Amino acid sequence: RAVRGLARRLFPRAQRRDDPEGSVDVPVGEDNTGVFVDVHSSGGYVFYPWGYEDSKSPDNDSLESLARKMASFNGYKLWAGGQPDFQYPVSGDASDYMYAAMGVASFGYEIGKAFYEDCDLFERKIAPDNIPSLMYVSRTARRPFRIAKGPDVLAFEVAEAGNANADEETGEATATAMLLDVSVTASDDELLNSDFKTGRQGVEAVRLSVDVHPDDEGGAMMEMEPVGGTNNNSGRRSFELQVSTDGMAPGRHTMYSVAVDGAGYEGPVSAVFFDVPVRAAIETDRPTTSAPQTAEPTTAAPVSGAPTA
């Protein structure tokens, strides 16, 4: 009852169903928001609807796609209707209820190998295997039924390329802005670990924004350029772009990236930090004996959706 009450407060009333049992064959809609994750032990499974019977839900494409990506981090099997590892029908399955009644993407983990797991094994192996999977699914919570079908950013790096306004002859800086080399590698199928239908559209584009999340209004999106020799049919595709820091205040900034497949589905948003240094004026009306300040920018470790061993 407590979990149901919390779900009613969290998830929008408009997407709930008053008669979930009478709507088991009706998709919930790709624009629904919210993810529910239940954690059990043990066995090494990711489970999702349906659990009460061995049949697929009407939103199976989205749910199976997301479950496959969650399992790519921990190597777990899929326990759901229509899957070869469906173990047995269950009653009182919270993931079935949250999906059917609340209209959210619902999953569960059967973690570890024992009901009472060894504490050392849990900290050394089970938690590290599952935390990246939990972090991944949390990034889809805004529109999980759509985002599950989109491509994933596997690598995202930002590095200083030089000064944006260097003198063409001398190479000396003439302004405070610098250029950033941005590189992204994305894939529509790698985290699925199979030829599942949602991974067949390839990566059509990758878009960037700075300091404004792609889901928020007011941010200017920048289209990245595909690197030669990669195509959008399948597998990994690489993109690059040079971005100027002109107009950005000194200090830490956030760059976001999102990949788009050939069907128009956007995947989870990834992000990295980068720092714009404080630079003293290079040209001045007065002589000065102090050298210009040229603190180097730092970049956070790239966000990667790649599965961990």
Image: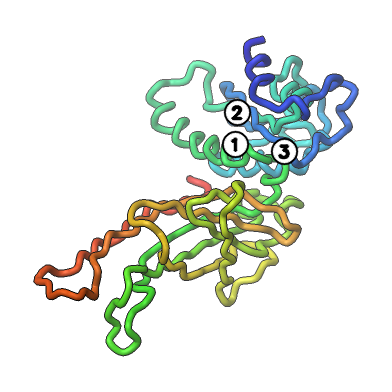
* Above/below status of 73 relative to 1: below
Q: Secondary structure at mark 2?
A: strand
Q: Is residue 97 left or right of residue 251?
A: right
Is label 1 in contact with label 2 (beta carbons under 8 Å)?
yes
The colour scheme used to paint the residues is rainbow
Among the 4 quarters of the image, the one containing residue 292: bottom left
Among the 4 quarters of the image, the one containing residue 226: bottom right
Q: Could you tell me which residue is drawn at 75 percent across and 36 percent down?
A: 83
Upstream in sequence: badge 3 or badge 2: 3
Upstream in sequence: badge 1 or badge 3: 3
For label 3, count other residues whose C-alpha is less than 10 Å away and answer few (under 14), some (14-19) or many (20+): many
Q: Identify which residue, 180 or 94, lies in the foreground.
A: 180
Toward the top, the furthest residue is 1
For label 1, count other residues whose C-alpha is less than 10 Å away and answer few (under 14), some (14-19) or many (20+): many
Q: CA distance from mark 1 to mark 2?
A: 9 Å
Could you tell me the amino acid type at mark 2? Tyr
Q: Is residue 91 left or right of residue 193?
A: right
Could you tell me the amino acid type at mark 3? Leu
Q: Is residue 201 left or right of residue 252?
A: right
> Which residue has dot 2 on it?
109
Among the 4 quarters of the image, the one containing residue 278: bottom left
> Which residue has dot 1 on it?
76
Which x, y percent locates residue 4? 68, 15
> Which residue has dot 3 on it?
63
Determine if residue 107 is in view.
yes
Circle number at residue 198: none
* Above/below status of 127 relative to 255: above
Q: CA distance from mark 1 to mark 3?
A: 15 Å
Upstream in sequence: badge 1 or badge 2: 1
* Above/below status of 298 relative to 98: below
